[in-house]
């Protein structure tokens, strides 16, 4: 369980929807408007009872009045919580979403503009600026997608719903404490559908434990346009969860011919020197950096990219336990620092298409008037619907499945 209590939860879903497109407002207007409060008598009764519980934990009446003045039940939040099915994406698809080339270019500029702040944070907490920047990029597209849903409405809705009632009530209490301390106002206390907030998407309970007032203004402000407190809070979170200064997160490696991959995975650690003796070498050449007791990951199988990861990789997973997430942060951090694309080849997918061919197929559908969305090479529902519509319009068997034959037609 990660700091939010679920894998790729609120922040992950916001990040996935944000990636691969040009930065814009925190949430598209259509998405923000979909999360509207609706009358619900049972919810109102729950809030009335909750006020007594909150008061017993030190939340004042004025804070409760201000917090719930415009708060309410949001049914779409419950729907999101009920449909958190994991996106069982390949690493190739995941990277296409969280680290596309246009986002890397934008992110290098965003990190450069905050270079002095990031350097100061690195000096204080021992976490590299590139890692902090990468978390920022994955979680909120460098602050451009921080979420627009009132945190009190989201957490109270989910606490009332009851599926994870105690978890969300604890976060609601912490959200109210944020308001009572004066760190922000009810109108600014906004985030994702499950209450993840700010530039690096802390939920309130994590905020309570790890957020810091880096700029010394008396408030731990992770919501404002200035990301300093949020970035420092992320560095503090990683440090307090075991980040080891000076230890790289990992490195892409190449494996010798015939390498036995049965010893891969984070449960099979060996000294860096042992991996060297087995012929594991950096994909870009040179000497294998010292990674301590490291693990070898081959997320796409023996023929795809391989990575040797350190204990700091495990620390990244405290933010989110998905290995794809950890690799996304690590790889994006290297790209933000000027590194090149992965050297390993993912190869064709089950339909026989490579990523560049999938992008070409999506672009072809768009040109033909069938909306496949951003040509990112990730085949999701929107692309499958566009394929089906194209096939139907052309009198072809309707499968919704991409293929080399379909690409040739386009």
Image (tube, rainbow, N blue to C red):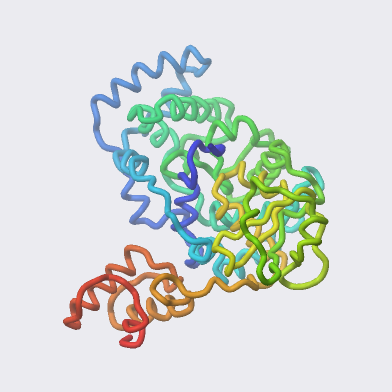
As drawn, 237 above or below 176:
below
Any part of residue 361 in sight: yes
Report which quarter residue 137 is drawn in.
bottom right
Q: Is 157 on the left-hand or right-hand side of 199?
A: left
Q: Is 317 on the left-hand or right-hand side of 374?
A: right
Q: How many marks?
A: 0
Q: Where in the figure is residue 28, as x and y percent of width and height? A: 40, 57
As drawn, 378 above or below 189:
below
Q: Where in the figure is residue 265, as x and y percent of width and height? A: 62, 51
As drawn, 182 above or below 28:
above
As drawn, 345 above or below 271:
below
Looking at the image, which residue sits at the far left?
395
At 46% from the left edge and 59% from the top edge, which residue is drawn? Answer: 89
Q: Is 5 on the left-hand or right-hand side of 137?
A: left
Closer to the camera in the image, 54 or 103: 103
Report which quarter residue 267 is drawn in.
top right
Q: Where in the figure is residue 357, as x and y percent of width and height? A: 44, 80
Closer to the camera in the image, 193 or 175: 193
Any part of residue 213 in sight: no
Q: Where in the figure is residue 15, as x and y percent of width and height? A: 49, 54
At 67% from the left edge and 56% from the top edge, which residue is drawn? Answer: 296
The C terminus sits in image quarter:
bottom left
Closer to the camera in the image, 110 or 60: 110
At 76% from the left edge and 62% from the top edge, which residue is drawn? Answer: 278
């Amino acid at each position: 369980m990660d700091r939010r209590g679920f894998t790729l939860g609120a922040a992950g879903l916001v990040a996935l929807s944000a990636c691969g497109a040009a930065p814009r407002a925190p949430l598209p207007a259509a998405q923000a408007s979909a999360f509207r409060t609706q009358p619900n008598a049972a919810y109102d009764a729950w809030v009335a009872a909750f006020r007594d519980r909150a008061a017993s934990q030190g939340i004042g009446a004025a804070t409760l009045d201000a917090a719930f003045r415009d708060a309410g039940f949001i049914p779409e939040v419950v729907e999101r919580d009920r449909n958190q099915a994991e996106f069982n994406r390949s690493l190739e698809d995941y990277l296409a979403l969280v680290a596309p080339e246009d986002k890397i270019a934008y992110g290098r500029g965003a990190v450069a503009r905050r270079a002095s702040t990031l350097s100061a944070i690195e000096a204080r907490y021992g976490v590299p600026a590139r890692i902090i920047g990468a978390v920022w990029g994955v979680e909120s597209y460098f602050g451009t997608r921080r979420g627009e849903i009132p945190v009190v409405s989201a957490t109270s809705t989910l606490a009332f719903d009851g599926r994870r009632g105690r978890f969300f009530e604890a976060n609601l209490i912490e959200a109210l404490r944020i308001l009572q301390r004066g760190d922000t106002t009810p109108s600014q206390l906004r985030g994702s559908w499950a209450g993840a907030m700010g530039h690096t998407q802390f939920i309130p309970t994590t905020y309570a434990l790890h957020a810091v007032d880096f700029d010394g203004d008396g408030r731990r402000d992770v919501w404002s346009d200035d990301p300093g407190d949020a970035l420092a809070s992320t560095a503090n979170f990683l440090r307090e969860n075991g980040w080891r200064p000076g230890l790289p997160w990992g490195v892409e490696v190449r494996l010798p011919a015939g390498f036995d991959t049965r010893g891969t995975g984070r449960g099979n650690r060996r000294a860096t020197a042992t991996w060297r003796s087995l012929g594991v070498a950096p994909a870009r050449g040179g000497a294998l950096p010292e990674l301590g007791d490291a693990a070898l990951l081959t997320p796409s199988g023996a023929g795809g990219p391989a990575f040797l990861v350190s204990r700091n990789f495990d620390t990244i997973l405290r933010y989110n336990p998905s290995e794809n997430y950890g690799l996304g942060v690590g790889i994006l951090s290297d790209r933000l620092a000027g590194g090149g694309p992965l050297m390993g080849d993912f190869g064709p997918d089950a339909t026989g298409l490579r990523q560049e061919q999938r992008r070409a197929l999506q672009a072809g559908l768009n040109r033909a008037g069938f909306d496949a969305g951003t040509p990112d090479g990730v085949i999701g529902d929107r692309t499958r619907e566009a394929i089906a519509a194209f096939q139907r319009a052309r009198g072809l068997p309707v499968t919704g499945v991409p293929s080399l034959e379909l690409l040739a037609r386009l």
